[in-house]
Image (spheres, grey):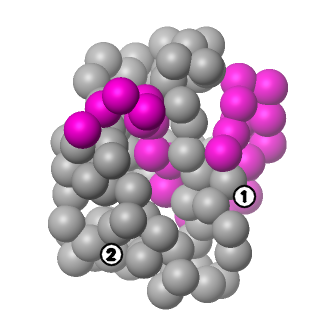
C-alpha cells in the first residue's frame, strides 16, 4: 500500500478506519528526513495490518494545530479514528513495529 499524503481536507477520512500511523513532518526537518526511509520500509511490511499517512505541517496547519503538534516528527497512532499512541522524535523501526503490533 502506498503511503498517503494527507491534507487538512482529507485527514479525517484517512484515519477513520483501522490502524493508521500518522507522521507529522516538514521538508526542512532533519529528523523527519531520517525517519522517512524507516516508514517506507515499515509500510512494505505492514500490508493489511496498518497504513501510514504523512502530514506536512507547513501545508496543513489546521490538522497539526488540532492535534497539538509542537515538535516534529510527531507520530500519532490512530485506531478507528481515535488516538491510541503518541511518540515524538526519531524512532527506530523496531519501536514503531511494536507500537503498531500492540493495536493491530
Q: Answer few, some or many: residues within 10 Å of disc 1's Cα (few below 14, many 20 plus, some between 14 and 19).
A: some
Residue 48 visible, this orientation: yes
**Residue 61: quadrant of the picture:** top right
**Residue 69: quadrant of the picture:** top left
Q: Earlier in the sequence, mark 1 or mark 2?
A: 1
* The N terminus - image quarter: bottom right
In the rendered image, the vertical position of residue 2 relative to residue 72, given as above or below = below
Q: Nearer the viewer, residue 25 or 10?
A: 25
- Queried whether the magenta region covers residue 96, the answer comes back as no
Q: Answer few, some or many: residues within 10 Å of disc 2's Cα (few below 14, many 20 plus, some between 14 and 19).
A: few
- Segment colored magenta: 5-30
Give percent across and percent down for residue 82.
Answer: 56, 44
Residue under the image location 32 percent in, 43 percent down: 32
Give percent across and percent down for residue 29.
Answer: 30, 32
| Cα separation between marks 1 and 2 | 19 Å
Give percent across and percent down for residue 91.
Answer: 21, 57
In the rendered image, the vertical position of residue 27 relative to residue 90, given as above or below = above
Residue under the image location 57 percent in, 71 percent down: 50
SS at badge 2? helix
Q: Which residue is mark 1?
A: 17
Amino acid at each position: 500500500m502506498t503511503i498517503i499524503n494527507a491534507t487538512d481536507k482529507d485527514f479525517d477520512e484517512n484515519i477513520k478506519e483501522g490502524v493508521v500511523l500518522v507522521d507529522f513532518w516538514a521538508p526542512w526537518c532533519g529528523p523527519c528526513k531520517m525517519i522517512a526511509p524507516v516508514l517506507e520500509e515499515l509500510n512494505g511490511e505492514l500490508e493489511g495490518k496498518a497504513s501510514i499517512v504523512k502530514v506536512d505541517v507547513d501545508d496543513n496547519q489546521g490538522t497539526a494545530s488540532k492535534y497539538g503538534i509542537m515538535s516534529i516528527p510527531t507520530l500519532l497512532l490512530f485506531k478507528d479514528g481515535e488516538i491510541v499512541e503518541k511518540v515524538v522524535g526519531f524512532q527506530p523501526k523496531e519501536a514503531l513495529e511494536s507500537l503498531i503490533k500492540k493495536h493491530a
